[in-house]
Image (cartoon, rainbow, N blue to C red):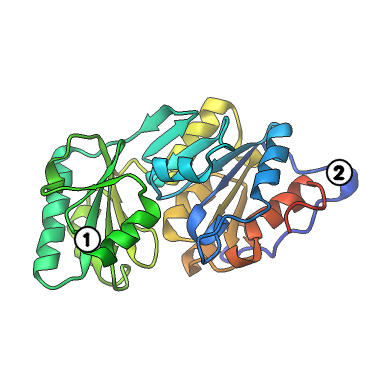
Amino acid sequence: MPSTPSPLLTAPDPSAGPADIRLVVTDMDGTLLDDAKRIPAGLWPTLAELRRRDVLFSPASGRQYATLAEQFAGNDEGMVFIAENGTYVVRDGVELSSDPLAPSVVARLVEAVRELTARGADVGAVVCGKRSAYVERTDEAFLAEVRRYYVRHRTVTDASAVDDDVVKVALFDFGPAERTTAPALASFARTHQVVVSGEHWVDVMNPTANKGAALRRLQRDLGITPAQTLVFGDYLNDLEMLDAAEWSFAMANAHPEVLGRARHLAPSNNDNGVLRTVARLLHLPSHLGG
């Protein structure tokens, strides 16, 4: 991979036709969504056109599957949701793959967060199950952040012992997670994935779990190559999936490490970078892509 991404590609030579892309995979927050968390207006007609061309569209997010399904309700036929940072993959309501954590690990993580809180850290845990997310912290400031990403969530007295398959434990830190919460989880990083997925979020998953692993499994199952895959990302939990595509784009607003990992650069999330790039590479009609 180049140390810095190439500039945004212009449309391919019209005489050569559109790029041979069969799968479009995009992160949500900071990538497809703008900073106000809005879906771009042109997404729905773009999805219809991609479906007409037999190009699969796949949201790949740290968000909960139920949240993603709600966001794409009515437009999700055949769509593959790579949810919970690749730990839970669903198509048309059917699970394709999952990578649950051992209950003992979940219990240790919940206890670690309790200890951080006792020492004064302003942090809370979200135990992410297939059916729901579970939290112990009940203050409105924390729950407001949880609701952004987990439409199905429950407050419980003991999040370490929920009756669900837990695929991820997410920690929300009201401070800078990369400098505070993530280092505090160093003992888990020796055996598990500890990923900074946003300015305030850290996700802990099995060592085999990430968006890239889920994407490679999907490519294998569908017979789609990295050369036929277009991927967009902006943060550290997107790194592995950028490696799984030859058409890998960092958003202009991306984390420096992501900018150094992707092959190409897209306009920012606030400049409709995903749809503009898809439209250019696939020669979509001029009214699409912004």
Residue 284: numbered disc: none
- Identify the residue position indicated by label 1 in the image: 124
Residue 65 appears in view: yes
Query: Is residue 31 left or right of 209 when viewed as pictured?
Result: right
Residue 16: numbered disc: 2
Q: Callout 2: helix, strand or loop?
A: helix
Neighbour class for label 2 at 10 Å: few (<14), some, many (≥20)? few
Tag nearer the camera, 2 or 1: 1
Which residue appears at 18% of the width and 34% of the height? Answer: 163
View extreme (right): residue = 15
Q: Position of residue 78 (x, y in %)?
A: 57, 30
Which picture quadrant has residue 65? top left
Q: Give the mark, 2 or 1, whose residue is nearer the N terminus.
A: 2
Which picture quadrant has residue 207? top left
Between 39 and 258, the residue placed more toward the observer is: 39
Residue type (three-letter) at the residue carrying disc 1: Gly
Between 78 and 221, the residue placed more toward the observer is: 78
Query: Is residue 211 left or right of 154 when viewed as pictured?
Result: right
